[in-house]
Amino acid sequence: MNLISVIIPAFNCASTILRTIESVLKSRKKNRIEIIVVDDCSTDNTVDVVTAKFNKLRNEKRRLTVVKSWRNRGAGACRNKGLKLATGQYVMFVDADDILEESAIDELTRVANATDADFVTFRYHYVTDAGTRDEADMLANDREIWDSVLPESKNGVINPHIHSKISKMTNYPWNKFIRMDFARAINLTYSETPVNNDIAAHWCLYSSAKKVALYDRALIYHYVVKGNDQITNLFDQRRLAVFAALSDAEAHVFRSTATISAFYHHFMDFKLNLLKWIYKRLPSAHQELFLTQAMESYKSYGKSEHVYLALKSPRLADQSFWIKHSPANVFH
């Protein structure tokens, strides 16, 4: 029997977090869990409802912790704080409105133990209607990547340096089940930026792992509802913090010749697509500063990088060149 640490960043989620906690509790029967809720200075009664729930559960000898931050620092800081407190053999991160499938943690623990993988990644349900869980699937791009990599695996296990396309799946923190000693060894850390704080950890995990297990079943429902105050829907000046998050991620990609060879072209493709996605949604008042910061972000893109990238994708190499010198040509 293993101890699994489940870390939940929380901010103004009193209406959803109890359902999330209940799903975590129902996701295991064979293994022990500790639930660590890190509140990001909520202004509603999130801490009160979680504390009341945990007080009821303590009689069942569960490991339950709620930590309150005294200033709002974002989900990345919450995950880092929770990770420092975690004591399990495995760790996973769950958002405060996510729903785990029944037996999800038991299934993931079984796969992790059987494969000795550094981490297990798994399919998910991406839900845009808060009132339903019907017909939800992964995002189309993630589904295409998954379906192309899985057949090349050996009993569902890959070396991400060989099957590096897997790193282009969306950088979600909640569809990964991570061996704790691996997380400690690589100093797994989330960016403490207001947006995109999960990018660096995603690239750190894939560029550091030697063995990743792909579990071909959707085990979590992730809700992204248009019009609410989720970070996904945030497009004011705070979105420009993406450049700091990308810089954090690049440090992992550029860590060695091996990581550059395996991941650089995928990372640069991811970076370009992310920046295009942001620019299209950014108010015009912030676009000039965005272009200036984009140029700064590509200043290290030199001749050797251009030649290497052109061998993989001439179009990507050309657009990277233009962002360095005249980004309006790419983003307008």
Image (cartoon, rainbow, N blue to C red):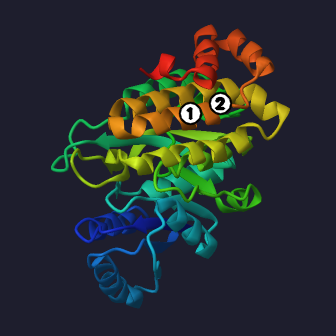
Measuring 58% from the left and 65% from the top, which residue is drawn there? Answer: 80
The amino acid type found where label 2 is placed reads: Tyr
- In the rendered image, which quarter is residue 45 located in? bottom left
Which residue is farthest left? Answer: 131
Whether label 2 touches label 1, CB < 8 Å: yes
Pick whichever, 229 or 172, lies toward us: 229
Quadrant position of the N terminus in the picture: bottom right
Pick whichever, 162 or 239, lies toward us: 239
Measuring 40% from the left and 61% from the top, which residue is drawn there? Answer: 27
Mark number, residue 131: none
Task: Identify whether 39 is placed above or below 229.
Answer: below
- Local SS, label 1: helix
The amino acid type found where label 1 is placed reads: Ala
Measuring 60% from the left and 62% from the top, which residue is drawn there? Answer: 90
Left or right side of 59 for 295: right
Left or right side of 126 for 112: right
* Residue bearing the label numbered 2: 298
Mark number, residue 294: 1
Res. 116 visible in picture: yes
**How would you rate the neighbour count of disc 2 (Cα within 10 Å): few for under 14, some for 14-19, many for 20 or more?**
some
Task: Identify whether 222 is placed above or below 29.
Answer: above
Pick whichever, 56 or 283, lies toward us: 283
Task: Identify whether 1 is placed above or below 61.
Answer: above
Quadrant position of the C terminus in the picture: top left
Relative image position of residue 15 (x, y in whole percent) = 22, 68
Left or right side of 58 for 82: right
